[in-house]
Amino acid sequence: MTEHEHVRVAVIGSGFGGLGAAVRLRREGITDFVVLERAGSVGGTWRDNSYPGCACDVPSHLYSFSFAPHPDWPRTFSGQEHIRAYLEHVTDVFGLRPHLRFDSEVKMMTWDQDKLRWGIETSRGFLTADVVVSATGPLSDPKIPDIPGIDSFPGKVFHSARWDHDYDLRGKRVAMIGTGASAIQIVPAIQPDVSRLTLFQRTPPWVMPRVDRAITGAERWLHKQLPFTTQARRGLLWGIRELQVQAFTKRPDELGLVERLARRNMARAVRDPELRAKLTPDYRIGCKRILLSNTYYPALTRANVDVVDSGLARIDGSTLVAADGSTAEADAIIFGTGFHVTDMPIADRVVGTEGRTLAEVWRDGMKSLRGATAAGFPNWMTIIGPNTGLGNSSMILMIESQLNYMADYVRQLDVLGGRAALDARPDAVEGWNDKVQKRMLRTVWNTGGCTSWYLDANGRNTTIWPGTTTEFRSATRRVDLGEYEVLRAPGPNTSGPRTPESRIKNSGTKGAKKVEAGA
């Protein structure tokens, strides 16, 4: 990266979202872009999460790009190493390596209102970009709770997303904090090797069987020889999940049958009524993400495992004290406590038109237009933005929808010509979010009686999309210029093409003028 490099598009992050954006830009004929990655390789969350047992809870053929089908998945639910290898493969096949800038953590992004471009300060230098596509993802920055006395703990402490592979857990007393998607994979993976495993649980999850198996050689051969069979498999997996959405979003009572199946799954593995009582949730299934495992419950019944159904309250040296006063000794603490999802750290590093950071604008809750753009942050887009998460299907479907929106966004800038930028109108952002939140009211995520990581500090669900992936695909197929203000730099290009209904007014800010498209 040269000191004053300028690119048309800067993509932040090289996980599914960032690599997908890079592929789409190339397919649009755009090669003047870089992918800024803070680590030394691609992969995003599938690079960072390398803990024992790490795997995806979405079927492999659905958890992959539609434009890069992979006929050779080894299992119906792939492990971390296979997904990471797939992302490396995508990087090579689509020629993305020349665009990658590794070890380039973004420190700050500041909008230049006079030049209509972003100034980006990274750990390797400074560059500017006409458009920024932020694909850092919501599962990128680990969250470790502030436990009193943690500094006094003499043993090893790490988060599941920052696994210390140099530390040998064999024969150790290990405390696992949390019972989310990572924890239910870690517990059965390490239980046979540790001397004692204490699971600190605040809220038990609903766990369904994981219908996983090796994909046969015959199936893989068929998918290679007849590519439409891969597409058919993907389509079937997608269709089933689309049909399930109604129960999550409109009729949560229909999830009662699923709940009974989950109870039966627990009863088969956990015979001890006292332990079963600890593991039985008191909220509607689906309110938190439904987890999949065949080994979690059996691991909890082993003689060297204790379940403390009271959260960790404090630490006194090597003694961990739960909220109910019970104690456990530990040599190592593993936090499976999730990520900064509703308070994404990248928001502190984005400074918009009014000199405020995105975090300041989002202080009362994240809001964006169609999960992509925010008012006051022109030519800045996010992949997997507010209310684009899913509770039952593949996030790759949502990512590809947002890539459609990104592609049309750049096309619209081309049509406008000259030095132009698009800034989401505040009323459009509010209107979109009002509709989303109204739909959210009847969903299981809001009515199921739980507190989940889907909710922000104000209890507002800023994470999940309350509809089908088909609906989201339709809503993000095209950019509606009526939802944006067109900014133009002063000079000879100020009078570039615009709709007849547009009018120009002074923005009240230094430099650029605003063109209210469709006003």
Image (cartoon, rainbow, N blue to C red):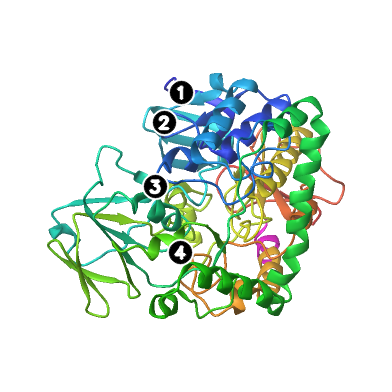
How far apart are labels 3 and 1 at the CA level? 34 Å
Write the residue at 48% across / 43% down: 45
Determine crowd level at label 1: few under 14, some 14-19, many 20+ residues with C-alpha closer than 10 A: few
Which residue is at the front of the view, 338 or 200? 200
Q: Are marks 2 and 3 in contact (CB under 8 Å)?
A: no
Q: Which amino acid does label 2 sit on?
A: Ser
**In this rendering, the label closer to the viewer, 3 or 1:** 3
Which portion, as a residue range, is magenta? 425-430
Q: Are marks 3 and 1 in contact (CB under 8 Å)?
A: no
Left or right of 449 on screen, residue 228: right
Q: Quadrant of the N terminus?
A: top left
**In this rendering, the label closer to the viewer, 3 or 4:** 4
Lower sequence index among marks 3 and 4:
3
- Identify the mark at residue 161; answer none if there is no mark: 3
Left or right of 309 on screen, residue 463: right
- Residue under circle 1? 4
**Residue 288 position within the rendered picture, expressed as x and y whole percent measured from the top left:** 54, 68
Count of picture labels: 4
- Identify the mark at residue 104; answer none if there is no mark: 2
Q: What residue type is labelled 1?
A: His
How far apart are labels 3 and 4 at the CA level? 22 Å
- Identify the mark at residue 361; answer none if there is no mark: none
Write the residue at 40% across / 54% down: 188
Write the residue at 76% across / 47% down: 479
